[in-house]
Amino acid sequence: MRGKFSIGGITRLALLVLLALPWHGYAQELKPWSGGPTPALALRDVDGKTVSLADYRGKVLLVNFWATWCGPCREEMPSLERLQAQLAGKPFAIVAVDIGESESKVADFLERIKVGLKVLFDKDTGTARRWKVRVLPATFVIGPRGEVRYSQVGEAQWDSPAMVSAIRRLMPGVD
């Protein structure tokens, strides 16, 4: 006589438990970039102004690809906000690139969560494709000379000591 649980049932149950775990605490190390030259990025912000990577030359720039429908993206936004506040006055900036959504939908979302990040719009998803973004959130840390130094796929706690330390090490003249 078979027991109450079959091996297949236990495997499915274990998989469901793993999928339900909060993964935000696990992705805390930045992966060194090995994807070649920095892809182009020139997108409009909420004011209609075109913003490009060249605008951030001399600073460390965190480029975060996200969408309002992405749960992990929404979960990590407060830590991005705290990171921005923690590094205020330093040669550092964050741009949050929304993928494929309308400006009104994003504006409504940002009003509800009260995040003050610089938001850019990749309405046709062409920039995300050039950056080889396949999973959201996807984040890239750009050095002061405009080269991608690190990448992070999935949610992260951006204001954790490990993340802050890795970002600060890229800043010119900051210890």
Image (tube, grey):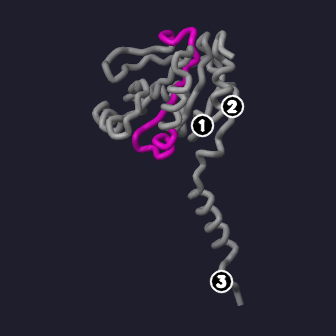
Q: Give the residue at mark 3.
A: 4
Image-quadrant location for residue 13 = bottom right
* Placement of the N terminus among the 4 image quadrants: bottom right
SS at circle 2: strand
Q: Give the residue at mark 1.
A: 153
Residue 41 lies in the magenta-colored region: no
Q: Compare marks 3 and 1 and give the one earlier in the sequence.
A: 3
Q: Compare marks 3 and 2 and give the one earlier in the sequence.
A: 3
Q: Tell me where the magenta segment starts and ends, as one range.
A: 54-76
Measured along the vertical axis of the image, is residue 20 above or below residue 88? below
Q: Give the residue at mark 2.
A: 31
Marks 3 and 2 sit apart, C-alpha to C-alpha, by 43 Å
Please name the amino acid that badge 1 sits on: Val
Q: Compare marks 2 and 1 and give the one earlier in the sequence.
A: 2
Within 10 angstroms of label 2, few (less than 14), some, or many (20 or more) residues? Answer: some
- Please state if 34 lies on the left or on the right of 144 as rendered: right
Please name the amino acid that badge 3 sits on: Lys
- Please state if 120 lies on the left or on the right of 14 as rendered: left
View extreme (left): residue: 104
Q: Position of residue 32 (x, y in %)?
A: 70, 27
Marks 3 and 1 sit apart, C-alpha to C-alpha, by 39 Å
